[in-house]
Amino acid sequence: MPQDYGFGPERVSRFLYGTFDFFFAASDPSLGYSPDGNRLVQRWCWFSLWSAEFPAGNLLDPKTKQLTSVGQAWREYVLKQ
């Protein structure tokens, strides 16, 4: 969603952190994948390297090719894992 709908970089970064934390932690002994500690999610991807239509989740600025603040949040999260 666009920033003018209330989805600024801070909110998008909080969503990124919250969903990634959930993906790492969600498990269930009867539904999860036992070789992976019964986790419910084994793989995921943030689909928005850059988008002209919905730029709020862009990881890169399409003009400068530099990380956006959301891209920096993604990088920080990945590096701490």
Image (cartoon, helix red, strand yellow):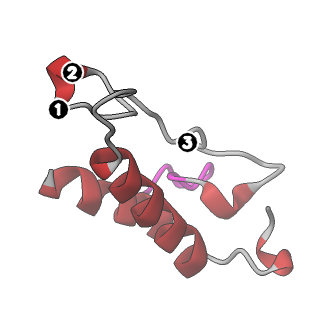
Amino acid on which the number 3 mark rests in the picture: Leu
Amino acid on which the number 1 mark rests in the picture: Gly
The stretch in magenta equals 59-67
Discs 2, 1 touching: Cβ within 8 Å? yes
The label shown at residue 76 is none
Q: Which class describes the residues within 10 Å of circle 2: few (<14), some (14-19), or many (20+)?
A: few
Q: Is residue 22 left or right of residue 16?
A: left
Magenta stretch mostly in which secondary structure? loop
The label shown at residue 49 is 3
**Residue 50: image x %, image y %?**
63, 45
**Residue 74: image x %, image y %?**
37, 56
Residue 68, can we see it? no
The image shows residue 17, relative to residue 19, as above or below, that is: below
Discs 1, 3 touching: Cβ within 8 Å? no
**Badge 1 element:** loop
Which residue, as the protein is rendered here, is positioned at the far front? 30
